[in-house]
Amino acid sequence: MIKKMNDLTAYEWIEKDTVSVDMENWNGGKVGNLIPNRYTHYCKIMNSTFYRDRGITDETLLWSQFHPNEHETEIDLGEGITLKELASKYDIPYDKKISSKSIERKLGGCPRYLIYPDEGRINLDMLKEMTKVLAPFTKDKPCYFFYNILKLIGRIPNHEIENGHLYTGELIDIFNMYNKGEIDGLASPTYWWPEDRSWCMSTDYDLDFTIFGGSKQMLDALMSNKKLECIEVDLDTRVDD
């Protein structure tokens, strides 16, 4: 049963185990700034596939060239396209550095025919696959779900927004959290992890992928799931490039 915690004590280890951003000597955001630096293996998992807008036939058209007052803005979602497929299509190295921004850099902008994965929100189908992989490793351990302020604004009444919300429950309760709140629910947490801290997931509000930290066995299980697009990274991998 999901329960809201009265304080954020159970979350404090994450802030302690992540590297603070040094704005005076800024050299980019890295995996180590977002996920606890205690694990042997890390990967980023795309929040969803990209999707083709079937209403756009000109693949050279960029979003920057698209003017809503001149074009219809209705989107007709077509098939899903993985980042790996796009990397192959546009001859972009598919390695730990790749991200949605790699496409923009290569083409000089975002293609209008592509609908990008949501930032800060794991697609529900992808979330189901993630929990399916994590369940055997988590078993009946209690789990925690933390939402920072930016994940709460517009989703719960303003007077209930504090310094973030922390909930506890079973792993499966993440789906109750996903639909909890106003508009379209709280969706995926900023952080979620089991009581023994054997793994941790981080979904930053302005990234279209989620970062996982855990064991090699868990990484292998995630990487072998054909419905998830997982790319192995390390603590020094840039997340904003």
Image (tube, rainbow, N blue to C red):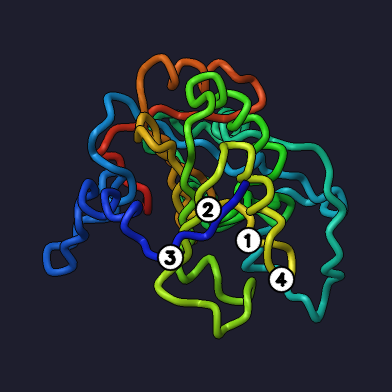
Q: Amino acid at mark 4?
A: Glu
Q: CA distance from mark 2 to mark 1?
A: 7 Å
Nearer-the-camera pick, 121 or 236: 121
Mark toward the start of the polypeptide (2 vs 3): 3
Look at the numbered discs 4 and 1 and tell me whether their residues touch, using CB distance below 8 Å.
no
Q: Of the residues shown, which amino acid type is indicated by label 3?
A: Asn
The residue lying toward the viewer, choosing from 83 and 185, is 185
Q: Would you call the spot at circle 3 few (<14 residues within 10 Å), some (14-19), or many (20 or more)? A: few
Residue 19 image offset from top left, x and y in percent: 20, 51
- Inter-mark Cα distance, 3 to 1: 18 Å
Give the residue pinned by disc 1: 186
User: Mark 2: which amino acid?
Assistant: Pro
Marks 2 and 1 close (CB-CB < 8 Å):
yes
Residue at the image position 20 percent from the left and 57 percent from the top: 20
Q: Residue at x 59, y 31 (%)?
A: 130
Give the residue type at disc 1.
Answer: Leu
The residue labelled by disc 2 is 189
Image quadrant assignment for residue 183: bottom right
Secondary structure under the numbered disc 3 in the rendered image:
loop
